[in-house]
Amino acid sequence: RYWRDWSSNVCSSDLQYFAKKAYQPFLVSPDLKDGEVSIYVVSDQQKNTQAILDIRIIDFGGKKIFEKKESIEIKGNTSAIYFTGEVKNMIGAHATNDVLLSVSILDGKIILSANVLYFMPVKDLTLPRAGLSKKIREEKGEFILELSADKLVKNLYLSLEEGDGFFSDNYFDILPKEKITVRFKPFEKIDVKTFEQQLQMIQMGDTAGKSFLSFLKLH
């Protein structure tokens, strides 16, 4: 299965982002084995919960290939499989190295948990060069960073060229046409213009079939 692919050289201070995502009341976890996808839902809640299971398969440009939505009852304090399907039946003639499965469980419009499954290891994915868009605003001493992309952005890393602070999220994927909001709290006071100038982004990309890290500095 390829739904977790954290780099082995991530420093210990960065693991807080991964741990934060892991310790949630609900976890939806897609698993790939022998050409079949199984979707598990884990609940730490005492009571049962009504939810919507939303499954989509898209290519890295955002084209929808497969979609399924259904109502489920998540049993309290359990881990159970709520969906199984054969990959070949879901993706048809599409190659497994340029499609992904996105799954979420929802309570109305509230996302209880979401996850992404890649059908191949990261080194074998045909990652596109994505165009990133951003909006920045200041709010009570913090900066709100709204990000979106026209194509898949894999493992986006945020940092400042100079200065330091805390990003509310990091090392994350942005799916095509998806909007992600990240908060940044600087350790020392800076203005919006300085933050925008110092902001650096690194994403995984792909050129001529060879994976590489592309450095993006957005102005």
Image: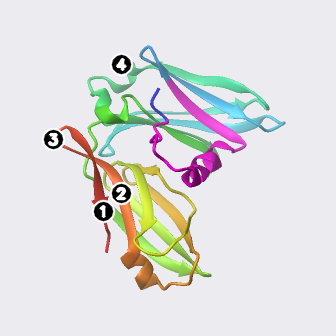
Q: Earlier in the sequence, mark 1 or mark 4?
A: 4
Q: Earlier in the sequence, mark 3 or mark 1?
A: 3
Q: CA gap, disc 3 to disc 4?
A: 26 Å
Residue at screen point 34% across, 26% down: 91
Question: Residue 44's spot in the image, x, y percent?
Answer: 77, 37
Residue at screen point 49% across, 36% down: 4
- Between tags 3 and 4, which lies in front? 3
The amino acid pointed to by label 2 is Ile
Position of residue 35 in the picture relative to residue 165 (left or right): left
Residue that badge 3 annotates: 208
The amino acid pointed to by label 1 is Leu
- Between tags 4 and 2, which lies in front? 2
Residue at screen point 63% across, 33% down: 71
Question: Residue 27's spot in the image, x, y percent?
Answer: 64, 38
Q: Are marks 2 and 1 in contact (CB under 8 Å)?
A: yes
Residue at screen point 58% across, 47% down: 18
The amino acid pointed to by label 4 is Lys
Q: Are marks 2 and 3 in contact (CB under 8 Å)?
A: no
Q: Which residues are magenta?
A: 4-31
Residue that badge 1 annotates: 216
Q: CA gap, disc 2 to disc 3?
A: 19 Å
Callout 4 secondary element: helix
Q: Earlier in the sequence, mark 2 or mark 3?
A: 2
Residue that badge 2 annotates: 202
Q: Earlier in the sequence, mark 2 or mark 1?
A: 2
Q: Which of the pair 83/136 is nearer the observer?
A: 136
Asked if residue 34 shows in the view, the reply is: yes
Q: CA gap, disc 3 to disc 1?
A: 19 Å
